[in-house]
Image: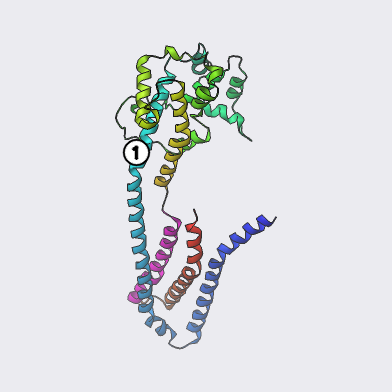
């Protein structure tokens, strides 16, 4: 109950500056309108203040726009500076997926695994099967049938998990078959999905944690020697120090799975989220304020000065500019405190 009250109070506290600003606007608009109706030559007094309103609004709006421009350029430079890190982690993931692709197409799998996944349960994904272990999930009937199948095995799950790293919609995936860097990047959504569904952890689980249980079912010696060399070479490209003293085998694959799930994917998604991030909320906040000042504090007085439309426009202009300045004054500190939190 206390937590709910605290949350409600925080939400209400955030609206206090806006409520006060609306009150200020109403008071100003009402008093100025009253004076216009009851004070002789008040329209001339309003007209004399147009230049002051225009100058003040233009100055504040100009400062805000200068700050926003500098902020955008700063963010752009920061993203450019992190681009090599994004490229490095992306290329590491390309190499991991290349190793996984070789494993999928190797002879390591016992009889029946490929037929079970690729034919009998065609279309089933690792994500469908993992839904079963999630709370309040809604797994598909095909996933339930697969789990209860008499041919179900741990290695069939591993095969299905490794297939989640393949993109079947591409007839030829360049990232899997070249020793050079490929300038193709992953979407943040698919990387986050791999993390959420624990994709890649099966390499550690079956080649380390449960290797003694499954080693007799794996045909490690039947893997094509060329595949072994390519997989070892890709591991060295990922991390020379980590894999230089390891021959191709279960230890190398287990270490690769650990690095994939605990290092490469988390780092990559963090960088991608940063690169994909929109402008900070403070820039949107200041842009709105600058827009109000330009429209009501610069454009409206200028137009009214040229065409002498109505003193009501002067009243609206003064009310909006003063209320906006008041809102900036009372809300900026609180907004900065919220914005600085990580």
Residue 46 vertical placement versus 143 (above, below): below
Q: Is residue 81 magenta?
A: no
Could you tell me residue 312's position as x and y percent?
45, 76
Residue 335 vertical placement versus 169 (above, below): below
- The answer to whether any part of residue 123 appears in the image is no
Comparing 85 with 169, the one in front is 85
Residue 53 vertical placement versus 62 (above, below): below
Comparing 225 with 47, the one in front is 225
> In the image, what residue occupies the spot 41% across and 70% down?
296
> In the image, what residue occupies the spot 42% across and 62% down?
286
- What is the span of residues highlighted in magenta in the rendered image? 279-307
- The answer to whether any part of residue 341 appears in the image is yes
The outermost residue toward the left is: 180
Taking the image as shown, residue 236 lies to the left or right of residue 21, namely: left
Comparing 306 with 201, the one in front is 201
The outermost residue toward the bottom is: 40
Task: Work out which quarter of the rendered image holds the N terminus and state it.
Answer: bottom right
Identify the image quadrant of residue 271. Answer: top left
Could you tell me residue 136's position as x and y percent?
64, 35
Could you tell me residue 199's position as x and y percent?
50, 30
Identify the image quadrant of residue 214. Answer: top right
Q: Does the magenta stretch include residue 299?
A: yes
> How many badges with numbers are in the image?
1
Judged from the image, the secondary structure of the residue bearing numbered disc 1 is: helix
Q: Specify how the rendered protein is coloured.
A: rainbow
- Magenta-drawn stretch, dominant element (helix, strand or loop): helix
**Residue carrying label 1:** 87
The outermost residue toward the front is: 245
Q: How crowded is mark 1: few (under 14 residues within 10 Å), some or many (20 or more)?
A: some
């Amino acid at each position: 109950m206390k937590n709910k009250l605290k949350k409600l109070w925080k939400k209400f506290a955030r609206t206090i500056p806006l409520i006060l600003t609306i009150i200020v606007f109403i008071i100003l608009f009402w008093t100025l309108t009253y004076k216009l109706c009851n004070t002789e030559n008040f329209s001339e007094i309003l007209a004399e203040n147009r230049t002051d309103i225009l100058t003040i609004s233009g100055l504040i709006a100009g400062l805000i726009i200068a700050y926003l421009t500098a902020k955008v350029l700063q963010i752009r430079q920061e993203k450019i500076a992190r681009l090599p890190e994004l490229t490095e982690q992306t290329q590491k993931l390309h190499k991991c997926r290349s190793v996984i692709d070789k494993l999928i197409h190797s002879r390591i799998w016992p009889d029946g695994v490929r037929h079970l996944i690729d034919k009998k349960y065609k279309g089933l994904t690792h994500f469908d099967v993992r839904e079963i272990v999630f709370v309040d999930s809604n797994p598909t009937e095909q996933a339930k049938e697969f789990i209860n199948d008499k041919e179900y095995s741990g290695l069939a799950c591993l095969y299905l998990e490794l297939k989640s790293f393949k993109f079947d919609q591409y007839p030829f995936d360049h990232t899997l078959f070249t020793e050079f860097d490929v300038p193709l990047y992953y979407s943040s959504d698919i990387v986050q999905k791999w993390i959420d569904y624990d994709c890649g952890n099966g390499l550690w689980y079956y080649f380390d944690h449960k290797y003694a249980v499954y080693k007799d079912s794996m045909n490690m010696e039947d893997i094509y020697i060329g595949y072994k060399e390519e997989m070892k070479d890709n591991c060295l490209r990922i991390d020379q120090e980590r894999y230089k003293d390891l021959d191709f085998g279960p230890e190398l694959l287990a270490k690769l799975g650990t690095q994939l799930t605990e290092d490469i994917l988390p780092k990559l998604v963090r960088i991608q989220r940063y690169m994909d991030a929109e402008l900070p909320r403070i820039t949107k906040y200041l842009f709105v304020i600058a827009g109000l000042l330009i429209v009501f504090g610069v454009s409206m007085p200028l137009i009214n000065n040229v065409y002498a439309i109505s003193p009501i426009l002067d009243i609206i202009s003064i009310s909006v500019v003063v209320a906006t300045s008041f809102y900036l004054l009372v809300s900026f500190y609180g907004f900065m405190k919220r914005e600085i939190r990580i």
